[in-house]
Image (cartoon, grey):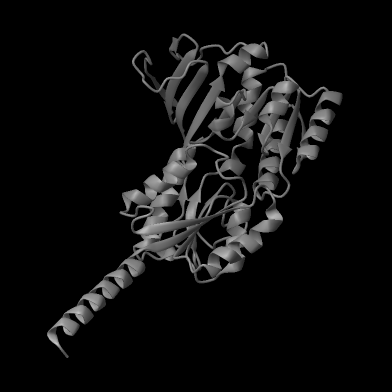
């Protein structure tokens, strides 16, 4: 072989080897969710930050394939199959229905889930400390928050006696949420009616029933409700702060950004060869209460500063740890938003 030909061959082989190494080092992560892309602003960024904390950057050493069911749960199985067929290194699911679809689609691809109902109780995994099979993730306890939601509504509307709980029957969170909320309503002597809705027509029909029966307040773990609640002047509490920030009355639930950052970190650890069985399922212990004072005023409600909270204009924030509280002045808080009262974090619910 002539020297020139040898050099040409060597250069080509080196380039091929470098390309092969790049292909091998660039991992693919699948993301599956029941909702629509962008349903909760900031979620995608938080997830990317979690991956970055473990050294993975989208477009550099890893890629993400996303599939969204747009609220159509019957699409989840085929979407999960598509992602598994793409030979993803990890499959991340953003809710319970997506998690079950992913579990049915593969028994080998690692799955990192975010779920609101007890994953052991519903049979997704066998235990928290060493999850069975190929699944692990974060449990945000949304299904356990019904009694707290009812308590907070009752505190803000002490004369309310007819409460409606609106749930999506296709979501596994709904059954547990309804059961626990009913027990709390019985203890408080309140009348609780559970209504279900999956489609826009279902939601409109449910609000028609609420108006007909003169419901006083609403607990929500269904989607697309804020505008209807405002249109019917219905005080409502939601499990995610996003709804209160978009003119819902109030919310109580885990800080969504930190949840998605955490599952991003878990996905990154999977990409670093960690096994799901060695990653204990994490449980949320920090919750945020957010009250939109503008909406409260429009509903004719007065939100009294209680528990020694400090108020600056229309904004109040207080941090709760266990049964004690530590309040701080928000005068120099660059993140303060007018018309929003945020009480955070609350540990242990």
Q: How many marks?
A: 0
Nearer to me, 186 or 28: 28
Residue 215 left/right relative to 180:
right
Left-right relation of 210 to 13: right
Q: Where's residue 276, x and y in %? A: 44, 63
Q: Is residue 187 visible?
A: no
Farthest-out residue, top:
313
Measured from the top left, where is residue 184 in percent x and y? 67, 34
- Residue 47 in the image, given as x and y percentages of width and height: 43, 47
Furthest residue to the right?
212
Vertical side of 212 occupied by 349: above or below: below
Q: Can the viewer see residue 136 in this picture?
A: yes
Furthest toward the left, the residue is 3
Query: Eyeballing the image, is 120 above or below 84?
Result: above
* Residue 18 placement: quadrant: bottom left
In terms of image quadrants, where is residue 273?
A: bottom left
Quadrant housing the N terminus: bottom left
Q: Residue 156 location, x and y as percent?
A: 63, 18
Question: Which residue is at 44% across, 50% downward?
Answer: 263
Q: Give the camera-side residue of 132 and 38.
A: 38
Q: At 64% from the left edge and 52% from the top edge, which residue is drawn?
A: 69
Q: Residue at x 66, y 22 (%)?
A: 154
């Amino acid at each position: 072989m002539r020297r020139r030909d040898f050099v040409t061959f060597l250069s080509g082989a080196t380039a091929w080897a470098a390309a092969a190494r790049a292909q091998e080092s660039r991992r693919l992560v699948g993301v599956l969710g029941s909702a629509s892309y962008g349903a909760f602003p900031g979620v995608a960024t938080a997830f990317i930050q979690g991956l970055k904390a473990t050294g993975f950057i989208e477009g550099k050493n890893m890629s993400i394939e996303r599939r969204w069911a747009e609220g159509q749960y019957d699409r989840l199985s085929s979407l999960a199959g598509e992602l598994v067929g793409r030979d993803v290194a990890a499959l991340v699911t953003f809710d319970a229905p997506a998690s079950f679809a992913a579990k049915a689609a593969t028994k080998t691809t690692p799955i990192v889930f975010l779920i609101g109902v007890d994953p052991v109780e519903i049979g997704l995994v066998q235990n928290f400390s060493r999850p069975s099979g190929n699944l692990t993730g974060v449990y945000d306890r949304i299904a356990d928050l019904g009694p707290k939601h009812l308590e907070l509504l009752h505190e803000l509307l002490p004369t309310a006696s007819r409460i409606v709980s609106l749930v999506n029957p296709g979501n596994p969170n709904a059954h547990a949420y309804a059961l626990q909320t009913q027990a709390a309503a019985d203890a408080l002597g309140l009348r609780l009616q559970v209504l279900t809705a999956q489609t826009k027509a279902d939601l409109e029909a449910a609000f028609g029933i609420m108006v007909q029966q003169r419901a006083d307040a609403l607990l929500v773990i269904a989607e697309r409700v804020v505008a209807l609640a405002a249109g019917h002047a219905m005080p409502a509490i939601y499990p995610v702060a996003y709804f209160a920030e978009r003119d819902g009355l109030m919310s109580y639930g885990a800080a969504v950004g930190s949840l998605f950052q955490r599952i991003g970190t878990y996905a990154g650890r999977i990409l670093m060869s960690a096994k799901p069985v060695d990653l204990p399922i994490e449980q949320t212990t920090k919750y945020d209460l957010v009250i939109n004072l503008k909406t409260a005023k429009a509903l004719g409600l007065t939100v009294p500063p209680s528990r020694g909270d400090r108020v600056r204009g229309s904004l109040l924030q207080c941090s709760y740890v266990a049964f004690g509280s530590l309040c701080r002045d928000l005068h120099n808080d660059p993140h303060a938003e007018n018309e929003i009262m945020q009480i955070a974090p609350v540990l242990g619910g």
